[in-house]
Amino acid sequence: MTRTTKEKPYHHGDLRATLLAAALTLAEKSGLQGVTLREVARQAGVSHAAPYHHFSDKGALVEALAIMGFEQLTARLRAAVAMIPEDSEARLTAVGVAYVHFALEQPAAFRIMFRPELRSNNEHAVTSAAITAAGQQAYQVLRDEVVSGQKAGRIRSDPPDVLTLTAWSAMHGLATLIIDGAPSWTTIEPGEADYRTEVAARVAALVIEGLRARPE
Amino acid sequence: MTRTTKEKPYHHGDLRATLLAAALTLAEKSGLQGVTLREVARQAGVSHAAPYHHFSDKGALVEALAIMGFEQLTARLRAAVAMIPEDSEARLTAVGVAYVHFALEQPAAFRIMFRPELRSNNEHAVTSAAITAAGQQAYQVLRDEVVSGQKAGRIRSDPPDVLTLTAWSAMHGLATLIIDGAPSWTTIEPGEADYRTEVAARVAALVIEGLRARPE
DNA sequence: TGTACATCAGTGAACGCGCGTTCACTGATGTAC
DNA sequence: TGTACATCAGTGAACGCGCGTTCACTGATGTAC
């Protein structure tokens, strides 16, 4: 029994989840350097020492965010795959577009996932085994599609990791550049509301063109 | 006359350049959050108030680093182009490889160039017109090659900016992923000393394959 | 050539600030008998 | 069912720290006459 009606088993309920959500909101709103343990606690309406009952230190909280992010990304990529059962190439495109979408919708999470230095307290990059494993799962979704395309004779027979890394790089680069505002260099029209989706689809299509198996 | 033998026109000479160099070294060594005005001054062997005679604030120093970085990148890309006069596709590949090389050799500069939030004191991304202009110049080198390839009938006739952005994204993504250690997901052999150059060349080749004009 | 002055790069003390982390504590929840 | 106790989440004060920036200053260089 207990924890019947409410889902707050103890005192104030799952402060852990509240802290994570607050940290993400904060990162979205005030930038990554705005994410301090004290401010996170403040946003969660709790004293600044409370987080230490849920995370050993600040780095542990950020690491948890990165892992959550990769899990969500993996889910998004898998969902994209699941929606297009038949066409191998269309699935690859969909995965690429979904990747960029995720980054655009959750830029803060995306950045945290790929910035190892955020996890360390003051020193160099630290990527834990848990984060690597979470990232690998997302990578695997794309790689599976590449291999599947190869089996169907649609994708060239180079080493799958090279092909996957190529596609991954393109979509990752595009996402990163958009988030950081670099495409203002181009003369691409930012007119339409989702021109970025449009661009993502075109980039994905062009890259897949390069990965395609050719008759000759 | 004066400033004859030495190049130190005033007191200690060009402290400005010394500060910039110290900041870059510091970023390379201690990460981006290790770059503080006080530490930069310390490394330059000068009091912590001295930098204010050369930069209005910390953000101005970081901005100067970003501009310098883009200028170096542009020079590198142009040098790559200049070394291969004849073959349009080979030139494109060379630019892509040079891009990744630059990022691998100067990861700190590369990061500063593409992280607008580093320039603001505490708030959101700020990209000055000067940085945008510097970035645009580098972009233009790649774009020129794309257009040149189109004129030679080797590159498909899509809008040049879309093609350029595709190629740029792929190389930028690869560089970013390598710098941040993500390719540990793959099973690509990090055996050879310059396997990353090898990978960059293969990725560039695959992407250009997708941009190529096709007979049919 | 020499002196008086202006200019400007660098100094060192001081400011206010928010951070991460620790610590003894309080108070609520759950458990044993 | 009731009481005694253990557990554990959250509190608030305190620590030491390094930061960015300001300020009155010092001292060296360059300039005018």
Image: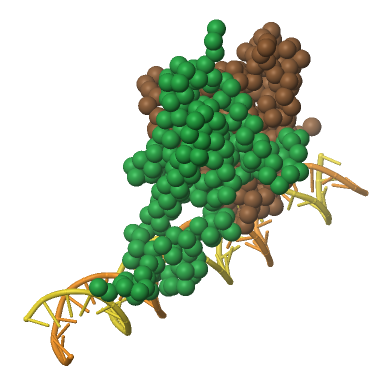
Chain colours: A green, B brown, C yellow, D orange
Question: Residue shown at 34%/63% (left/top)?
Answer: A54
Question: Residue shown at 68%/27% (left/top)?
Answer: B164
x and y percentages locating residue A63 in the rendered image: 40, 51
- Quadrant hosting residue B88: top right
Residue at the extreme front = A86
x and y percentages locating residue B17 in the rendered image: 64, 38
Placement of the N terminus of chain B among the 4 image quadrants: top right
Relative to A17, residue B201 above or below? above
Question: Residue shown at 44%/45% (left/top)?
Answer: A75
x and y percentages locating residue A189 in the rendered image: 76, 39
- Quadrant hosting residue B146: top right
- Residue A92 visible: no
- Residue B146 visible: yes
Q: Is residue C22 left or right of residue D17?
A: left
Question: Residue shown at 49%/30% (left/top)?
Answer: A86
**Viewer-nearest residue: A196 or B39:** A196
Placement of the C terminus of chain B among the 4 image quadrants: top right
Q: Is residue B23 left or right of residue B72?
A: left
Tally the marks.
Answer: 0
Relative to D1, residue B72 above or below? above
**Viewer-nearest residue: B87 or B160:** B160
Relative to B44, residue D2 above or below? below
Q: Is residue C4 left or right of residue A7?
A: right
x and y percentages locating residue A70 in the rendered image: 44, 45
**Viewer-nearest residue: B199 or B28:** B199
